[in-house]
Amino acid sequence: MLFRIDCRLHMLLIILLALRWFQPLLTEPGMFPGFLHMMREPEKFFPPHVKLLLMSQSDFALPYPGRRAEKKYDFIYSGSDQDVHNDCEGWSSFAKNWTFAKQALEVMCGEYGLTGVLVATKDKQNKKACTIPTSCHGKVLQTQYIPQNEFFDYMRQSRWVFFPQVHDASPRVTTQALMHDLPMLMNWHIAGGWKYLNEKTGEALHA
Ligand SMILES: *[C@@H]1O[C@H](CO)[C@@H](O)[C@H](O)[C@H]1NC(C)=O
């Protein structure tokens, strides 16, 4: 129950932010009298008379001159700013589905021998890192919360981007992945950002 409320509040906040962002557009003649949203099934949240537009802030990620780099890692996962002090337990880690990511890592490192980068899973002092499966030791690099240009460097050195998260409203990393021409492995249940996924851009994870 609590979670439901939280999730809706979250979505409302995103919508309000999006509306605020687009206000200059909306006050022009021919403004859009409705809601911008990112949901798969908006009819479950809005009454039928409300006009809807599937549009997110992530749609406006700036194009980027994607320099090529030598690939060093199979996957990259961005944890934004993780709850490292608490071994990745907390709101941020919940939003990035860290518990599931860890289970997936076990398979990715252990069964498939993949290498990867886990961004922002190390604290700002560069000492403590969130625990990862032992099969990932030596295969996976954990970084601090890093500036965007450094993040992009890691993206260019990776082969694909991992999105295990569900409660995330169209993360900008998705369009950043596209702009770097990187395929995505994305949780089918992701709140927003699913619209970028098709047979040309990656695979959905139905877990
Ligand atoms: C994480 O992903 C799994 C697999 O889709 C899902 O069952 C679970 O509810 C998700 N948990 C969170 C906190 O997002």
Image (cartoon, grey):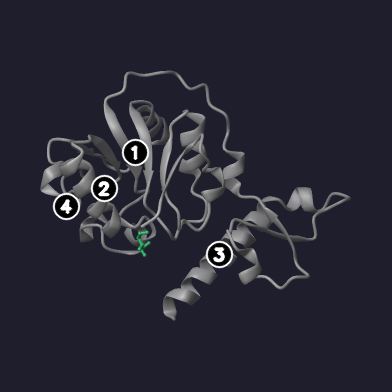
For residue 153, above or below residue 175: above
Assess whether mark 2 and mark 1 are in contact (beta carbons under 8 angstroms): no
Q: Earlier in the sequence, mark 4 or mark 1?
A: 4
Q: Amino acid at mark 2?
A: Thr
Spatial separation of the CA atoms under disc 1 and disc 2: 10 Å
Residue 170, horizontal then vertical, whole percent: 52, 51
Residue 131 is marked as: 4
User: Circle 1 — which element?
Assistant: loop
- CA distance for labels 4 and 2: 9 Å
Ligand 1: does it lie within 8 Å of the C-beta at label 4? no
Observer able to see residue 193? no
On the image, numbered disc 1 is attached to which residue?
A: 146
- Kind of element beneath mark 3: helix
Report the residue at 27% width, 59% height from top.
99
Q: Nearer the viewer, mark 1 or mark 3?
A: 3
Q: Quick check: marks 4 and 3 in contact, CB under 8 Å?
A: no
Which residue does the numbered mark 2 point to in the structure image?
121
